[in-house]
């Protein structure tokens, strides 16, 4: 997950490209400052007229969701290398990196089972890296908590039960990313905390301020020495529903089944291309985004936008015939979502 | 048309309400500054939790498009007065204002007629205040211009023809409202300029940066002493199409028919309600939006948003039990789109 919003899209490309050309070689007698103003204006006008980042984004999205280890991720890497070469970038190359390989598998299903409220189907989505349930699924009573502190005070009440993390994002934080960050631990660390309390599974409210029926995924991890239990998200609407059923029938059960698997790590790649600097080519100005996305979405915004912006900034500089002093490089990093390996290797 | 964007929506409500309470009566020994910080925070939190402006907006939109003189405009006025009373506002009242009454009528249609390119149907929308075509429509050759200057240099070439204003909004202006302003004269003044050049009608490219098939409307006016000719918009996609056909076949004709009519002015109303100030009730802080919208859209953004924001700011202040020193008034003005009478009368 990257912090960005649609309204900053075009502006970001302009700023990236403009910042990158602050190393353009002087070509005439004009003062640097005046010349840079012209360069920035020419980049801005060309970018706004051509909107080339959208064409790049469309090429990337055509490959579909791009989770690390998936054929779509490999195809996206190949397509973006072809694209950078077609745009005339120099030194277009792939940098190997070892990535985790988790797959969702087939057949995720869930339901609330309550003699009082009836049987209510609920969409579930395995959280990235979660183990699967047994093939027959898990059925158990539910204990609802809104915070980790609440879980810690439960004593034995979570034992043998599914721990339902129903902490909503805080709507009073104007910066919604702070609200996201405040609630994200339920997803990343809910399974470990639930297992420590004796729980048999974790069910987590999706991280969104909206009330809808679309369960989100994301990443999680297990601890050494803590039993691994399966973890899923449910939508915000389903979370409200489950909470209401539990108010009326504290003995209601939740049943769910998932089929995810963790396979052996595989080799994937960062993609990079550049415009070589004419004075100090060994000094590099780097623009980047991450090319991977979760398996449930083509990730136009997170982070197809960052990839397209990085490529577009170089395209504009190159097509305007600008000669940067330093090398300007675009890097599409593999694996931000599920481990960050591409940025570390 | 009001300048506002969705991303500023919530922030605008907060700022409006916060600015309005900078006249709250001091209740304790605390410094004004510290107390105002608390007041602003309480308004902000309540607003973000409750999002009441959306409920107000839904009530307004339920009445449909609200062009001056329409039954929907009257219904919206009545509904908003009821709503303000239900929210407990004081002095809820209607202020009469005389508004123009233009109706679109039934049966708008257009087509490009070219022996070379074939007959191509084109959606047309009468511009607000335009006269209608004769009942059989208008069929004539077309002269395309991108600027008023270009029209002035045509000499006799516009005589007996339809003048096609195809000036696109400038995509290089980051502030799209400047681009809108730069192209809007084609719509507001195109018919007069075309008539002065001897044209029989004006066809105007819609004011949007996007290429789509949705013709926009808006307002226009006639001059005393210049023949009144009918004016319509076509979509940006249709404008590109017509331009391309004219390149291949300069003798292509355009045919269109509209049925709009201007009826006698009628009485409509501004709607207002307030929270009376406890120290200086005769001094008024006014928040406002315009309640009318074009007949082709319920105007959620332009300017349902402004109306809902104004009401929400007062609702938050009132429901928090704040006692402003000065009177805070919300006014929903009738007729911004087609004449501005409500703000003048």
Image (cartoon, coloured by chain):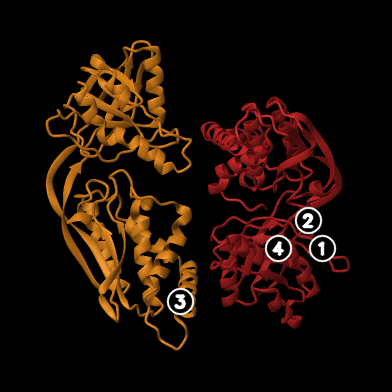
Chain colours: A red, B orange
Secondary structure of residue under mark 1: loop
Above or below, A332 against A131 in this view is above
Secondary structure of residue under mark 2: loop
* Chain hosting mark 4: A
Residue in the image at 34% along x and 38% along y = B216
Name the residue carrying label 4: A187
Same subunit, labels 2 and 4: the answer reads yes
Which numbered disc flags the more N-terminal residue, 1 or 4? 4
* Chain hosting mark 1: A
Q: How far apart are the alpha carbons under marks 1 and 4? A: 11 Å
Secondary structure of residue under mark 4: helix
Asked where in the image residue A24 lies, by quadrant, the reply is: top right
Residue in the image at 26% along x and 31% along y = B190
Name the residue carrying label 2: A129
Name the residue carrying label 3: B36
Residue in the image at 65% along x and 29% along y = A322
Check contact, mark 3 vs mark 2: CB within 8 A: no
* Residue A232 image point, x, y percent: 70, 60
**Mark 1 neighbour density, 10 Å: few (under 14) some (14–19) many (20 or more):** some
* Residue B79 image point, x, y percent: 27, 62
Of A295 and B125, nearer the camera is B125
Asked where in the image residue A246 lies, by quadrant, the reply is: bottom right
**B61 sits left or right of A109 in the view:** left
* Residue A39 image point, x, y percent: 59, 34
* Chain hosting mark 2: A
Check contact, mark 1 vs mark 4: CB within 8 A: no
Q: How far apart are the alpha carbons under marks 3 and 4? A: 38 Å
């Amino acid at each position: 997950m990257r912090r960005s919003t649609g309204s900053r899209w075009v502006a970001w490309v302009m700023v990236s490209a403009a910042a990158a050309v602050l190393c353009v070689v002087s070509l005439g007698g004009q003062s640097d400052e005046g010349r840079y103003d012209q360069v920035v204006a020419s980049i801005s006008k060309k970018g706004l007229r051509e909107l080339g980042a959208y064409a790049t984004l469309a090429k990337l999205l055509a490959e579909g969701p791009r989770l690390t280890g998936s054929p779509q991720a490999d195809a996206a890497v190949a397509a973006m290398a072809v694209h950078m070469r077609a745009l005339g970038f120099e030194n277009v190359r792939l940098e190997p990196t070892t990535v985790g390989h988790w797959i969702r598998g087939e057949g995720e299903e869930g339901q609330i089972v309550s003699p009082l409220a009836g049987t209510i189907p609920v969409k579930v989505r395995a959280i990235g890296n979660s183990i699967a349930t047994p093939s027959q699924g898990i059925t158990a009573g539910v204990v609802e908590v809104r915070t980790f502190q609440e879980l810690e005070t439960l004593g034995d009440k979570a034992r043998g039960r599914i721990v339902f993390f129903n902490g909503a994002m805080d709507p009073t934080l104007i910066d919604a990313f702070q609200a996201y960050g405040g609630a994200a631990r339920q997803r990343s660390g809910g399974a470990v905390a639930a297992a420590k309390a004796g729980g048999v599974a974790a069910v987590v409210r999706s991280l969104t301020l909206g009330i809808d029926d679309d369960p989100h995924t994301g990443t999680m991890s297990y601890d050494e020495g803590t039993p691994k239990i399966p973890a899923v998200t449910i939508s915000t609407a389903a979370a409200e529903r489950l909470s209401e059923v539990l108010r009326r029938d504290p003995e209601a059960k939740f049943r769910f089944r998932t089929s995810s698997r963790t396979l052996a790590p595989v080799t994937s790649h960062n993609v990079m291309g550049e415009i070589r600097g004419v004075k100090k080519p060994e000094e590099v100005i780097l623009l980047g985004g991450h090319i991977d996305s979760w398996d449930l979405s083509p990730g136009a915004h997170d982070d197809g936008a960052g990839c397209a912006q990085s490529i577009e900034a170089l395209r504009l500089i190159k097509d305007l015939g600008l000669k940067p002093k330093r090398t300007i490089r675009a890097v599409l990093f593999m694996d931000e979502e599920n481990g960050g390996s591409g940025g570390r290797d």
